[in-house]
Amino acid sequence: MSGHRSGVLELAVLGLLHETPMHGYELRKRLNAFLGAFRAFGYGSLYPCLKELLAQGLIAEEQPDPAGKSLAGRRSKIVYRLTAEGKERLQQLLAEPGPAAWEDDGFGVRFAFFGQTRADIRLRILEGRRTRLEERLDAFRAAMARTRERLDSYTLELHRHGLESVEREVRWLNELIASERQADGAAGRHPLEGSGGSSPRTTPPPGDNDTSAGTSAS
Amino acid sequence: MSGHRSGVLELAVLGLLHETPMHGYELRKRLNAFLGAFRAFGYGSLYPCLKELLAQGLIAEEQPDPAGKSLAGRRSKIVYRLTAEGKERLQQLLAEPGPAAWEDDGFGVRFAFFGQTRADIRLRILEGRRTRLEERLDAFRAAMARTRERLDSYTLELHRHGLESVEREVRWLNELIASERQADGAAGRHPLEGSGGSSPRTTPPPGDNDTSAGTSAS
DNA sequence: TCTGCCATGTAAGCCGTTACATGATTTT
DNA sequence: AAAATCATGTAACGGCTTACATGGCAGA
């Protein structure tokens, strides 16, 4: 009964409505096509979210028929659009690096909206995500080293597979980061206001290995 | 305030306590080492769960000192063990194929306890999981075909990566299924060998477990 | 007519998490 | 003695899912 707004849902709705106004039903379909593998929402999540975004003034109902014809009794198709405040909020959410941006949940949505995100923020999110995964990898390997002997072969196999998946994602991130850096150095969109002033803190963490960039085009 | 029992947590707790009795704190550490990459629980989840399992009679508090020195007034270290009913419930949960066993959440735990699971059930779960993933793959590809053109390159890249991950898991399952079938026919006991892994591991025999399937059912 | 999709919602509850509170035991 | 860690719990809420309820409109 209380809070219904969310990280991913709010962000995804704002992001999709930024591209084009839509009504709820269509929004949900696009949402699930958009988020694809890693998320799926039902109407029971979406409509309350829309309701609250509306209450916050971040979205608004669109007038299909401004005060003219009396279709008043009709119920169908409430089209929502993003308000100016909604756009602001979207930019704020996308530009805000931090834990939420590189946890499992948040990262996917952020990445999907990278087209709307500033280049330096993109890089920070990618690096943050990589760091997060490497932490997990370390903890994982440590735990495995400690308890290797009393785990049966199925559990070991599960862990091996999990480890491999995370390692794969790290390699993927490395390639993306390399691409971003290259595009940034060449001729991105527009250099930020600190072109020549502030040294961009793009140094990788100490003790980190290099990117063995194998172009995997399997 | 009401329901606290869960699919994964209940199962994991029962499974771990089946191996050896433990107190809550240690249980949680083992739990997180055991579930590793794909799950992590806090005390706020564990203790209520233990409480309810206790109330259901699936676990019981162990006497720390049977007829020994009187550590009686002591509060610390409540050691839990599995009751007979708990063992039954565990077997029931492990032997029950169905949606819960091949969804993202449930599958991992089930797989981790495959050592306790009958061979035919193992196979069914692996195949169920594979089917589930292939359904997802189909839906995904269909959605991609429909909306390919209006997705920007970041979104496409995200989807490509997601797709690849799922395809990878399907291949992994295929190898496991092949191993299971082979081992089943050969009456061997470690199905997990010979898959095309990258590292030449020689899995030591688990050493316990008497669930050798003599006659395959149906 | 009746099945099925479009379209919008509400109520209940699940399955956890986070933050808090407490105290005992070991280490520094 | 202080700090860290072990150890056990509670309260409150979060964020989503499921099931339900409603109704218009299309085509078989």
Image: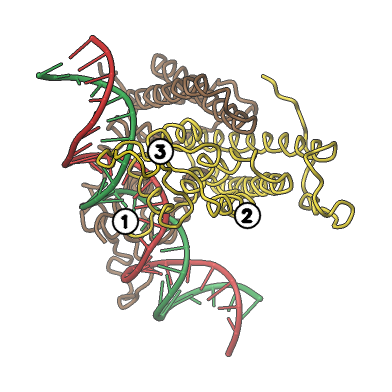
Chain colours: A yellow, B brown, C green, D red
Q: Nearer the viewer, residue A196 or A58?
A: A58
Residue type pointed to by label 3: Pro
Residue type pointed to by label 2: Glu
Q: Mark 1 lies on which chain?
A: B
Judge left or right: residue A187 versus residue B127.
right
Q: Where is residue B8 in the image (x, y as percent from the top left)?
A: 36, 44
Label 3 – label 2 distance at C-alpha: 34 Å
Residues marked 3 and 2, same chain: yes
Q: Name the residue under label 2.
A: A96
| Residue name at image x 60 percent, y 54 percent | A92
Label 1 – label 3 distance at C-alpha: 52 Å
Q: Name the residue under label 1.
A: B49
Mark 1 vs mark 3, foreground winner is: 3
Q: Identify whether B75 is placed above or below C15.
A: below
Q: Identify whether B35 is placed above or below A201.
A: above
Judge left or right: residue B217 versus residue B38.
left
Q: Where is residue A211 in the image (x, y as percent from the top left)?
A: 77, 37
Q: Mark 3 points at which residue?
A: A64
Q: Is mark 1 on a helix, strand or loop?
A: helix
Mark 3 vs mark 2, foreground winner is: 3
Mark 2 vs mark 1, foreground winner is: 2
- Residue B212, located in which quarter of the rendered image? top left
Label 2 – label 1 distance at C-alpha: 36 Å
